[in-house]
Image (cartoon, helix red, strand yellow):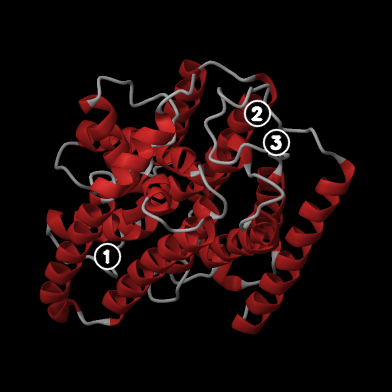
Amino acid sequence: MTLQNLVILFLILTVVSALSNYLFLIWTRTLGMKNLTPTESERWSHSYKPAIGGISFYIIFLVSYLVCLFYNNPELSSIDESVHQGVLIVVTLGFFAGLADDAFNTIPWLKLGAQIMCGMVLLFFGIQIEFFELVWADALLTVFWTVAVMNSINMLDNMDGITATVSVFILTAACTAPLAPENLFYTCICGGTVAALVGFLIFNWHPSRIFMGDTGSQMLGALLASIGVLFFWNNENIIIEHTWWSKMVIVATAFIVPIADSMTVTINRIKRGQSPFVGGKDHTTHHLSYAGLSDSKVAIVIALISAISSAFIVFISLLQPEQRSSYFIFLGIYSFLILVLLYGTTVWPKAKSVFHLKSTPTT
């Protein structure tokens, strides 16, 4: 498959995604709407909108997968079949777990069980983080990573355009030529998913008309967890050989927004004596809004952080191995500063005062 064919496929899938979501909006106004009262809703928006965007994600992911699998290209014959089959099964499992949650409001433990199962499936198909010298420790880290990413992406889906935008840049960095394997299989499925997200963002950018729902966030989380292992944790084309810290730096840079948001929410809720597993309006994105940014500007800020992070990763991948050390130190400092800045929005006096004002029940 040539680059020209990939570009054509991307454009076609973007149009298909936009049309699919438009048709979903016409055909249904209630599918995916959970039975929540305004006070119980954990979303930033108080209006009810169909949470069906994730359906188009999965459809277009499958189309991309099948096109790559059956395309008459000798490069595809070298793919480790068990690996890409594992990715397909994990994404499918994440999709149906999210679909069940959107349809039936499943209990949190059931969702957690599905996420753990996704991690176990990755292990079964040989997709495992290579970090420790002990196989069992790497296996535990892989399962933890899968659960953490799926939850982080799910938690990040709290304002218009945020999760889709962040996912676009992570996948774009992953499918960039220097990071991709010699074949174009993963470039194709990542690019196809990006096309699905771009078409979805037409309707999800503020003011949104559609949500991705748990169907979309769990499916994306499963895909990003898999891609994270293959392209960031274990990618010898970008890390510094035999250095554990370079893996942590590259992963932190690629996933800086979901990592910062999850860590911030978890730390603050524990400090307040609350469960970190219950939804709320105390995310970093919310605090950027409390600080005075409009919803659209919050999405733009998050998009800029994600775009810069992805650009840094691509830049590092273009360097010779002996040139990377100093730049990895810079990436580590950059990721730490972004983490501090996003956490700082939750302790900035103006943001805190507005947050507490909005959190106080009226009488």
Residue 6: image location, x then y, percent:
64, 75
Give the class, few, some or many, for how many residues have Cα within 10 Å of label 3's Cα (few <14, many ≥20): many
Task: Using the numbered discs, state the Cα–Cα distance from disc 2 to disc 3 in whole angstroms.
Answer: 13 Å
**Sequence-wise first label, 1 or 3:** 3
Front residue (pair 314, 185)? 314
Task: Using the numbered discs, state the Cα–Cα distance from disc 1 to disc 2 in whole angstroms.
Answer: 38 Å
- Numbered disc 3: secondary structure: loop
Disc number lying in front (1 or 3)? 3
Judge whether 201 appears above or below 323 on screen: above
Q: Is residue 62 left or right of residue 300?
A: right
| Disc on res. 48 | 3
**Sequence-wise first label, 2 or 3:** 3
Q: Identify the residue at image location x=16%, y=69%.
A: 328
- Outermost residue, right direction? 27
Q: Identify the residue at image location x=45%, y=38%.
A: 155
Q: Which residue is mark 2?
A: 102
Judge whether 113 appears above or below 333 on screen: above
Three-letter code, disc 3? Tyr
Residue 173: image location, x then y, percent:
42, 68
Residue 115: image location, x then y, percent:
46, 29
Residue 20: image location, x then y, percent:
80, 54
Q: Identify the residue at image location x=20%, y=65%.
A: 334
Three-letter code, disc 1? Glu
Location of residue 232 (image quadrant): bottom left
